[in-house]
Amino acid sequence: MILAVLTAVLLIVFVLRLARKPGAKVNLGDQEFALGKDTVFAAQVAKHGPLIFAPLRGSITLYVQHLGGDPTKGWLAFGAHDPGRPPTCNVAWRPATHDFEDPCDRAVYRADGTGLDQYATRVEPSGQVIINLRQSIGTTPPTSPPPKP
């Protein structure tokens, strides 16, 4: 738990420092979220795991994940909690197993966020990763059902 809090604080500091750089664009209140340069953030995700941003629009806490070796492809954005659970049940990244776990019901979600609300992503020709918070692209069930009591 302490590691998760420390990671979140470090990510917030990183985003705030990035936002102060000339030409940086961090629009946390917009319908489209400009994450930043694909090569920079792909390296961050590879090193530290998916990025979490809370909340970007209304009550959407968002994970941004990059899968694969090509920084121009493999970007995913998804809500940090099961749509049927309270927003306080944010899933947590488990680096050892490369998946997410819901702390409330122990459901497990794959690294691609299957089972969570997914949002459209794209990489601009400039290399900017853009997440469209208006364009939900659906959900599918989690990879494992919650354990029985």
Image: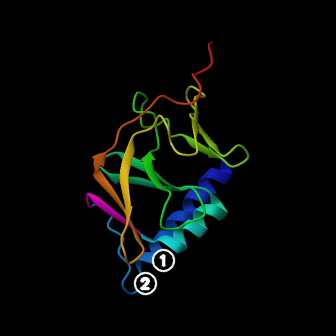
Which residue is label 2 attached to?
21
Left or right of residue 38, residue 43 in this image: right
Q: Which residue is drawn at 44% across and 32% down?
A: 140
Residue 64 is labelled as: none
The spot of residue 48 in percent (x, y) is 64, 61
Quadrant assignment, res 68? bottom right
Q: Position of residue 142 (x, y in %)?
A: 52, 30
Is residue 80 part of the magenta span, yes or no? Answer: no
Q: Tell me which amino acid carries mark 1.
A: Arg
| Residue type for callout 2 | Lys
The residue stretch that appears in magenta = 30-35
Considering depth in this image, is 90 or 73 the residue closer to the camera?
73
Query: Residue at label 1?
Result: 17
The x, y position of residue 7, in whole percent, is 61, 58
Q: Point out the residue furthest to the right here.
A: 96
Q: Position of residue 85 (x, y in %)?
A: 43, 29
